[in-house]
Image: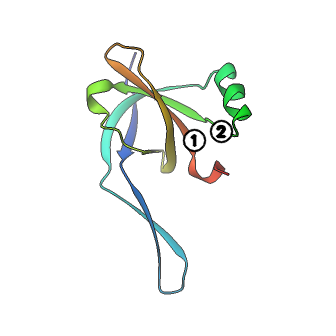
């Protein structure tokens, strides 16, 4: 598979407030990786919805490059990594949901 998408893996997201009380999000230092973007399968989407989860995107990266980060940034949008899938080879799939879609 071609790794043609740039993603940023982020360990932590911090929410603070500015002097007006507005929430401001900051993150730990992001790590740039190249990934393959995949669609969420229909089966996975419906099974996740049963548990009130909303998977939106999936990315495949090299297993050795993933360090257990909790967040991912793609096209200036932040996502939470819901779960990972390791088929036992050299790759790992990161299944993500948008931060704004969490209940």
Distance (Cα) linking label 1 and label 2: 8 Å
Q: Which residue is most to the bottom?
A: 19
| 61 to 20, vertically: above or below | above
**Does the residue at mark 1 contact the one at mark 2 (Cβ under 8 Å)?**
yes
Nearer to us of marks 1 and 2 is: 2
Q: Position of residue 94 (x, y in %)?
A: 46, 31
Which image quadrant is residue 67 in? Answer: top left
- Tag 1 residue: 97
- Tag 2 residue: 53
Viewer-nearest residue: 23 or 35: 23
Q: Position of residue 102 (x, y in %)?
A: 63, 50
Identified at 69% across, 26% down, the residue is 47
| 82 to 18, vertically: above or below | above
Q: Position of residue 55 (x, y in %)?
A: 61, 35
Q: Which mark is residue 54?
A: none
Q: Position of residue 8 (x, y in %)?
A: 37, 44
| 43 to 65, vertically: above or below | above
Q: Is residue 86 left or right of residue 53?
A: left
Q: Which residue is most to the front?
A: 51
Viewer-nearest residue: 1 or 50: 50
Q: Is residue 100 left or right of residue 82?
A: right
Identified at 70% across, 40% down, the residue is 52
Q: Residues within 10 Å of mark 1 (few under 14, many from 20)?
A: many
Identified at 27% across, 31% down, the residue is 65
Identified at 66% across, 31% down, the residue is 48
Q: Secondary structure at mark 1?
A: strand
Viewer-nearest residue: 2 or 56: 56
């Amino acid at each position: 598979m071609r790794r043609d998408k740039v993603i940023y893996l982020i360990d932590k997201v911090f929410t603070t407030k500015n002097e007006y009380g507005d929430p401001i999000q900051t993150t730990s230092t992001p790590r740039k990786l190249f990934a393959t973007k995949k669609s969420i399968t229909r089966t996975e989407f419906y099974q996740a919805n049963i548990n009130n989860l909303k998977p939106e995107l999936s990315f495949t990266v090299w297993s050795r490059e993933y360090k257990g980060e909790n967040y991912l940034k793609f096209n200036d949008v932040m996502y939470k990594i819901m779960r990972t899938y390791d088929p036992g080879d050299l790759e790992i799939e990161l299944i993500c949901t948008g931060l704004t879609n969490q209940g």
